[in-house]
């Protein structure tokens, strides 16, 4: 009987998480040939979501709760969950109810048919204009930096096979970017259409700063294209400077009057100085990330766990996390 590990990073979801977990269990219960393992990661949420997670884990041995020592970000939380995933298939969804658990098996079926990664593609996004802008920029960044196919949409609701998750978990450095890790592990990635729902409560925890940090992860972690762009821009600027200098010299030799002016000089200096600072900052970003990697900056730190010895659940009955030949079924459920 295959197992699905469902990973849910949790942040400001005290009010929504119980309903999301109930919907996940109901979705798997409708498919009696599957077991589930639900992994709830508290990304140092400022509300009481950890109390909610511990209560859910106490009531269901199929739920594992993980409490991170600080806010490491959604992608670090996902990788932490993958390291504890025991399923044949690993799925990741949001804690706000917008990614519908009822359509989970739309993502699982293509995996059974030979795909390695399946991303949800929303028929209609119920997001703010700011989040839509962020998603659009992120998509174009992934196409340019990561070689993502134009027709492939990347969303936070996805499923993958176990061997892909194991490969993703080999990434040891801080500031991971899950989409980049998935795309560099396989070319067998497809979309399935799902319905994007309204948030059950609250608002998105993504701020402009967090989105900017996510884009920087994609820029610097998986591609040297920004450095090549910097080289091209530097070359173009230098050629423009040499060309203008040659024009001034030739004009002077031919008896002409070289154009003079404080405003033009300052504009050129500000442009060239700004370009140099921008490119120096880009190089510094790469060097800084190299330093953090060498310095063994942690990707995430687990403070405590809830139901660490728990197993997986099937239908209305519970299954212990024993080796396959010792598996027992409770409450009359049969495999």
Image (spheres, helix red, strand yellow):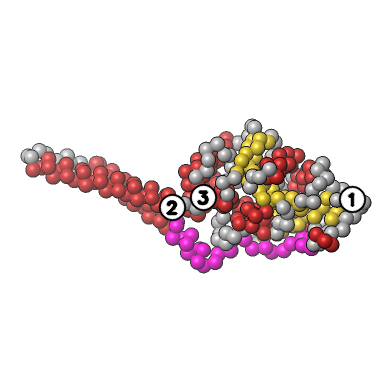
Residue 292 lies in the magenta stretch = yes
Question: Label 3: few (<14), some or many (≥20) within 10 Å?
Answer: many
Query: What number is the disc on residue 218?
Result: 3
Q: Nearer the viewer, residue 331 or 139?
A: 331
Question: Label 1: few (<14), some or many (≥20) within 10 Å?
Answer: some
Query: In the rendered view, does 121 fall on the left or right side of 262?
Result: right
Residue at 17% from the left image edge and 39% from the top image edge: 259
Query: In the rendered view, does 241 fall on the left or right side of 176?
Result: left
Query: What number is the disc on residue 191?
Result: none
Q: Nearer the viewer, mark 3 or mark 1?
A: 1
Q: Nearer the viewer, residue 29 or 242?
A: 29
* Residue at which label 2 appears: 224
Residue at 69% from the left image edge and 48% from the top image edge: 91
Q: Is residue 7 above or below residue 287?
A: above
* Residue at which label 1 appears: 333
Q: Nearer the viewer, mark 2 or mark 3?
A: 2
Question: Label 2: few (<14), some or many (≥20) within 10 Å?
Answer: few
Q: Earlier in the sequence, mark 2 or mark 3?
A: 3
Q: Earlier in the sequence, mark 3 or mark 1?
A: 3
Q: Report the Cα–Cα distance between label 3 and label 1.
A: 45 Å
SS at circle 1: loop
Residue positioned most to the right: 332
Identify the magenta region.
Answer: 285-309
- In percent of width and height, residue 32 lies at 83, 45
Residue at 21% from the left image edge and 43% from the top image edge: 243
- In percent of width and height, residue 284 lies at 42, 58
């Amino acid at each position: 009987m295959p197992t699905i590990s469902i990973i849910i990073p949790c942040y400001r979801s005290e009010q929504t998480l119980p309903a999301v977990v109930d919907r996940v269990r109901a979705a798997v219960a409708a498919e009696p040939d599957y077991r589930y393992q639900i992994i709830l990661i508290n990304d140092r949420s400022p509300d009481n979501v950890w109390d909610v997670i511990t209560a859910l884990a106490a009531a269901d041995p199929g739920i594992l709760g993980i409490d991170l020592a600080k806010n490491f970000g959604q992608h670090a939380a996902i990788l932490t969950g993958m390291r504890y995933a025991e399923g044949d298939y690993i799925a990741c969804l949001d804690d706000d109810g917008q990614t519908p658990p009822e359509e989970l098996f739309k993502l699982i079926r293509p995996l059974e048919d030979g795909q390695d990664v399946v991303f949800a593609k929303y028929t209609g996004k119920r997001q703010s204009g700011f989040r839509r802008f962020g998603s659009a920029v992120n998509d174009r960044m992934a196409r340019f930096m990561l070689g993502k196919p134009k027709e492939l949409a990347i969303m936070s609701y996805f499923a993958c096979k176990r061997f892909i998750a194991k490969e993703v978990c080999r990434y040891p450095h801080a500031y991971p970017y899950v989409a980049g890790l998935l795309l560099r592990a396989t070319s067998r990635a497809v979309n399935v259409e799902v319905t994007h729902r309204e948030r059950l409560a609250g608002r998105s925890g993504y701020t402009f700063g967090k989105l900017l940090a996510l884009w920087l992860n994609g820029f610097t972690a998986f591609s040297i294209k920004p450095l090549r762009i910097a080289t091209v821009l530097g070359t173009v600027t230098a050629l423009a400077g040499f060309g203008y200098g040659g024009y001034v010299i030739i004009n002077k030799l031919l008896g002409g009057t070289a154009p003079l002016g404080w405003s033009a000089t300052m504009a050129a200096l500000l442009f060239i100085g700004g370009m140099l600072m921008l490119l120096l900052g880009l190089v510094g970003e790469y060097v800084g990330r190299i330093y953090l990697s060498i310095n063994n900056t942690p990707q995430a730190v687990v403070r405590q766990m809830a139901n660490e010895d728990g197993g997986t659940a099937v239908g209305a009955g519970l299954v212990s996390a024993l080796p396959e030949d010792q598996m027992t079924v409770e409450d009359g459920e049969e495999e």
